[in-house]
Amino acid sequence: MPNKNKIKEVVKDEVIDKDYEIIPPKIDFVFKHIFGNEKHKQVLVSFLSAVLRVSKEELEGLEILNSELIKNHKKDKKGVLDVRVKTKDEKEIDIEVQILDSGYMAERTLFYWSKMYTGQIEAGGKYTDLKKCITINIVDFNVTPLKKLNSTFHIYEDETSYKLTDVLEIHFLELKKLYDKEVPRDENDPLVMWMEFIDGNKEVIDVLSKKNEDINYAYNLLKIISKDKKARMEYEAKMAAIRDEMTRLHVAEQKGREEGIEIGIKKGRMEGKIEGKKEVAERMLRKGIDVETVAEITGLQITDIEEIRKNMLN
């Protein structure tokens, strides 16, 4: 059973009454409270064990590199706050939760992976000092068209599937696909359980907490955070910022669509006028009127009229 005193250390602020809803762990600061806290590292170890398909023993000695909690990140509209860790064999892992789709996710994660990878050595360092870097992207939107909850990427040769190097590993955990009946999943898979926990459906988490000891521990942490008055205020501010950003994106998209329609209408009118002129030119040519006169009356180029006359003869 979790140590109640240990759990309560996660927050010390005033708590609200018992009638509350849990804050979804996919909210970045909540995720970091639960998975990026040195005092409760067993939660992080269990999660990484499920994602990387390695034993918990292999993750002993795990070091959280940025365990400090950022006090004020309400203005972060995209909902991004990472947990960076290092294993005992010096592999680096970056875990990020993102709620809002800002586009170019593949390029974005490669960019941040490269910064993590090249940041391991300074000028004059050796390539042998470079260790494996792993990024785990937990996203509340679809990134790939694959019918998979968790997609894992490496660098392979196109025809033979030979792995060039093992230093790059990128994961996408797509929470939206939990609701896609066409995506296969094993409900007893710890990775599926953790994804369902992070997604934040209270009824589902109630069931999971009875099946998985580590999720039960994390759930107790989540309940403490969810009762915290300041945490709830921050959650409301975070969601308001996200809603504002989603509205801004929707308005921009709608405006772009309307402008596109208007441009299309103008283009159609212009093309219609040109087609009308061509029809007049053809009738004039059939009556034997010379090309120069047709060009003067219709406003078409002589080359266009010559093309019309050529088509008439074919």
Image (cartoon, helix red, strand yellow):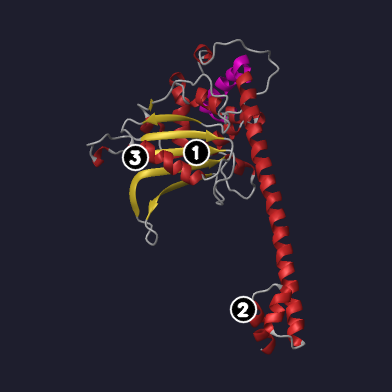
Q: 112 or 3: which is nearer to us?
A: 112
Q: Residue at x 23, y 39 (%)?
A: 126
100 horizontally vs 214: left or right? right
Label 3: which secondary element: loop
Point out residue 98 in the picture as x, y percentages from the top left corner.
55, 35
Q: 216 or 125: which is nearer to us?
A: 125
Point out residue 10 in the picture as x, y percentages from the top left corner.
51, 16
Q: Which quadrant of the figure has residue 185?
A: top right
Compute the Cα span from label 2 to label 1.
58 Å
The magenta segment: 210-232
Which mark, residue 77?
A: none
Which mark, residue 303?
A: 2
Label 1: which secondary element: strand
Q: Residue at x 46, y 25 (%)?
A: 36
Q: Is residue 73 visible?
A: yes
Q: Which quadrant of the figure has residue 294?
A: bottom right
283 horizontally vs 26: left or right? right
- Asked if disc 2 and disc 1 are in contact, CB closer than 8 Å, the reply is no
The kind of secondary structure the magenta stretch mainly shows is helix
Q: Is residue 226 above or below residue 76?
A: above
Q: Residue at x 57, y 26 (%)?
A: 75
